[in-house]
Image (cartoon, grey):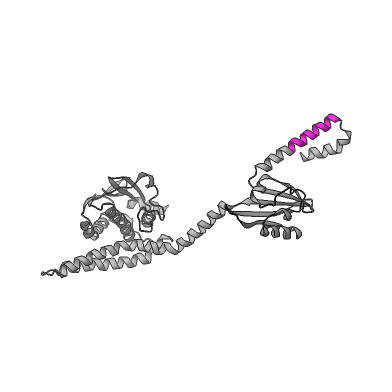
Amino acid sequence: MRKFLERAINKVDRMNKAQLSSLLLTLKDELTLKEMVMGSLTQGILVSDHEDRVVYSNKAIDRLLPLRLGDNSELLVWSIIDNDDIYHFVKENLFEHNTVRDKIFVINSENNTLILSISLLPLASKGIIYGNVLIVNDVTESKEREIKLKRAESLASLTTMAAGVAHEIKNPLGSMSIHIQLMNKILNRDNFNKDDFSKYLDIISDEVERLNSIVVDYLFAVRPMNVELVDSDINVVIEELIEFTKYELEESHISVNLKLNKDIPKIYLDVKFIKQAFLNIIKNAIGAMESGGELTITTEEKDNFVQVSIRDNGIGIEESIQDKIFEPHFTTKETGSGLGLTLVYKIVKEHKGDISVSSKVGEGTCFNFVFPGLFEKEKLLLK
């Protein structure tokens, strides 16, 4: 279009009336199109000439920038701005011929608050400055999101460790409390049973060790896990865990049904972490069966993968939130960090495994784990 106009101007003295009329219509259409484009922009545009007088502004500038009422054409740019901070910013930078990009201003009014990003750029061609353009963007939503995100990240960095540790240590503390009560009962009996007392003391000692382990190892929630994989029998792990939680399950009137396939292959595990993952699921199951129930744990082998399912017949999980339960900080409980299942998920993934959940409200929940068998695991480690 520019070349067309240059050629037309060179020939204007030789044009007849029809040609001039056609040229004017073309110019009108071009100006109308540009006006439509500028008018549709969400960013405010204000153009000044080389004397800093307003020569153009689009509709968005009136909505975004606090302007003085009246006809602002041909007035000095800063004189039409009804905000002291922006007034001085524009005036000083125009005087000094500065180029400024994305200067942030907060505009407070009775109804709302706007966060504006303002840029001041020269209109230049072939080294000649013809004026300036003021570009105003409403960045309120993006800045608010950014502020909230930074605030959340800051709070998370301060609270995640404390909240997560608090969540995890409730399990051993609860178990210790139960076994201390059992020890008190033994002490109050006439026929003191030294073997039972010693057994409970050993369990409490194990719980203290696990508390220490949780505190030391909890950094894996925010750092890569340092798993020590050894070939293990998952059935033995489950049996030890059930023995460990036996008394808590009995106190909660929950029966245990173990369906362990003795022919499944061994798998590479960090037993400490897998126990922590399974224990978290069992604790959740206990919480879901407040009036008692049945806990069923099944192991089986399929295509050299070991499958473990932990099923309860508790209150169940609503379908609408089942895809969110492994997300950090998601919880339906009044207390807790919402990190428990996130940690379970991370542990399983560190073992090259998979975890899924199926649940129905009023019928119960089943967590399904899949781990590569020893041969399959070796193939994965070689990749």
In the rendered image, residue 37, in percent from the top left (x then y), is placed at: 68, 41
Q: Is residue 15 above or below residue 65?
A: above
Q: Nearer the viewer, residue 75 or 46?
A: 75
Residue nearest the viewer, comparing 172 with 62:
62
**Residue 193 image offset from top left, x and y in percent:** 14, 68
Q: Main secondary structure of the magenta part?
A: helix
Please report the bounds of the magenta region as a residue range: 16-30
Image-based side of 167 in relation to 126, left or right: left
Q: State which quadrant residue 360 falls in.
A: top left
Question: Which residue is nearer to you in this view: 57 or 101?
Answer: 57
Is 253 located above or below residue 38 in the figure?
below
Residue 240, given in percent of the width and then of the height, sits at: 24, 59
Residue at the extreme top:
18
- For the residue pair 280 and 235, the one nearer the viewer reads as 280
Total numbered badges shown on the rendered structure: 0
Q: Quadrant of residue 271?
A: bottom left
Whether residue 111 sits left or right of residue 353 in the image: it is right
Q: Specify whether 268 is left or right of 16.
A: left
The question of residue 200 being in magenta is answered with: no
Q: Which residue ends up furthest to the right in the rendered image?
A: 13
* Residue at (74% x, 57% y) in the render: 94
Image quarter of the N terminus: top right
Q: Quadrant of residue 204?
A: bottom left
Residue sitting at x 62%, y 54%:
116
Which residue is drawn at the image coordinates 29% and 56% (left, top)? 283
**Side of 363 relative to 116 (left or right):** left
